Image (spheres, grey):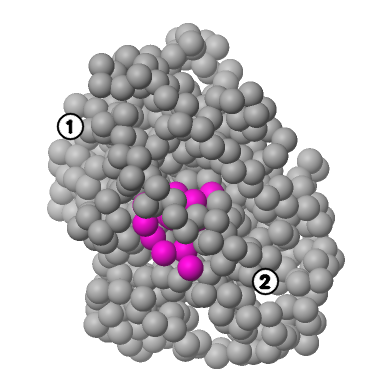
Amino acid sequence: MGIDQNDAVAEALRRLVSDSFATRLWQRDASLWPEPSPGGDPASNTLGWLDLPMRLSMLGQQFADLNSQLVADGFTDVVVLGMGGSSMTPLALSNLFEDSIANGSSRIRLHALDTVNPTTVSKITENLDLSKTLVFVSSKSGTTIEPLTLESHFRAAMESSPSSSMNRKNFVALTDPDTPLSERARAGEFGTWVATPEDVGGRFSALCAFGMMPAAATGINVRLFAESAARMAQRCSVDSEENPGLALGAFMASNALDGRDKVTLITSSEYSMFGAWVDQLLAESTGKNGKGLIPVTGEPVLKLDDFDSDRQFIVFKTGEDTDRLSHAIFALRSSDHPVFVIEPQSADKHEIAGEFFRWQIATAAASSLMDIYPFDQPDVESAKVKSRELLTDLRTAIDSVDLNEALAETTIHRAPKYVAITAFLPESEELTAAFADLRKAISQKTGMATTFGYGPRYLHSTGQLYKGGPQNAIVLGFVSGIYDHLAVPDESYTFGQLTEAQAGGDFMVMAEGGQKVLPVKLGVDPAAELSTATQQLIE
Ligand SMILES: O=P(O)(O)OC[C@H]1O[C@H](O)[C@H](O)[C@@H](O)[C@@H]1O
């Protein structure tokens, strides 16, 4: 591990150690943070995640035969319907273990569906043999609109599929013991229900059933996760400057307090969705009351000149392109940017479990140093309320601006402002690449950092930060002018209308809160439109 021992970082780390942060954290000492926002869960109800590494080997045993049973029962695919904390870990793992899943060693593919975009929903449904698909309905609260509407969709699709009669055993519920979803599970609507721990919040739930059961279903070795997580928990439990969670937390907080609040994570490509996982953890935990760490992940490769002095860098040095990462570390350090290097103990991908835990400890520690309560998300609800209102009046259209105008307006700004790109569009490699080019062009022209997230995924992640954190973002909010007409069963609206209402609701709330929001409507070929505009920006 390497850390730029500038004075402030060293001092912050010493403070955590001398204040016995680690001991007090394990003793569940709520005085480490300020009080939650009104209605937020108190710390005493939210620290159950500290026990998860030690419980993981038991969970591994519980799920040890799951994959072979599913294979024997003829299943070929697992789909997780969930948002934020309930889907981020399966999403990161499906990306990271893609090769072993694709080469057939597990014989079950893993898909995390965290969108209501009608094009994506239709596409994934068409590509699956539903009779051979196990559907996880994953929701801690059991009330989140996306997994519930998607569940209705999959139940209806199974009923109408000629090859399959609807089967309860195809549906698994992951939810807390006392939720509307668990009630339906008790009433027999699901083949399996696993009760999730009530004292573990969504973004801290990677190592419980939300993350681990879909992983086990797809053949990923949870026993190896348990070993990695237990090792990291051990190292993170001591009041010492060697504690890897405290070191990372001190680095992030002291740099942010020094004006470097853009936490830029550089990883090799197979860890790109781990970046999205970090987005949720940092943004929802710290982005509130006008403060926050701003995670910049999945950023295209930039030149040193394109980084302003609002940046701090964390390089996750493992995976396929460690040479590129070593080069980046050297170059960034040579130009006096603060760099923290994380090097997992081995290159084995199962080390990711320990990394989940390191980042959770680091987030708890950084929040304490920044005087932020990390276990609530007070501003997520406001956008949900507004989108429900919009769903009752479907005539309200989003006022959009022309793409070139929006970019012209964006590029007059400079750091420490940043550009938050949100896209309520069907996720694809081509589109993600087009947005990456746009991000690069913006940073090259202005020196501003950019963030990027598909909607509604970001609503359950960076959305909290955009609404509750520093009000210095320029939000480019992309929507489609043409959403497919895919009905939500038993509702008066379609998935397209739901998507539009979620976008419109969030844009309104962000603008009311003080962010500069520029909604842009794209047509049939969004990637091509973006490429043309990016080209014009460069010229
Ligand atoms: O698991 P659920 O209750 O469905 O919640 C899913 C997500 O919803 C909200 O947006 C919260 O801000 C997230 O922290 C949470 O992970």
Residue 133 versus residue 338 in the image, above or below: above
Q: Tag 1, which secondary structure?
A: loop
Q: Identify the residue position indicated by label 1 in the image.
A: 525
Whether residue 191 sits left or right of residue 106 in the image: it is: right
Q: Nearer the viewer, residue 213 or 45?
A: 213
Magenta segment includes 213: yes
- Residue 487, by quadrant, is top left
The amino acid sitting under disc 1 is Asp
- Residue found 32% across the figure and 60% down from its top: 97
Where residue 289 sits in the image (x, y, percent)? 69, 51
Residue 353 versus residue 424 in the image, above or below: below
Residue 459 versus residue 206 in the image, above or below: above
Specify the segment rendered in magenta. 210-223
Magenta segment includes 250: no
Q: Tag 2, which secondary structure?
A: helix
Q: How far apart, in angstroms, are the residues tagged by discs 2 and 1?
A: 44 Å
- Residue found 30% across the figure and 74% down from its top: 319
Q: Residue 372, labelled with which disc?
A: none
Q: Identify the residue position indicated by label 2 in the image.
A: 365
The amino acid sitting under disc 2 is Ala
- Residue found 57% across the figure and 59% down from its top: 59
The dominant secondary structure in magenta is helix
Residue 312 versus residue 33 in the image, above or below: below
Whether residue 379 sits left or right of residue 123 in the image: it is: right
- Residue found 66% across the figure and 84% down from its top: 13
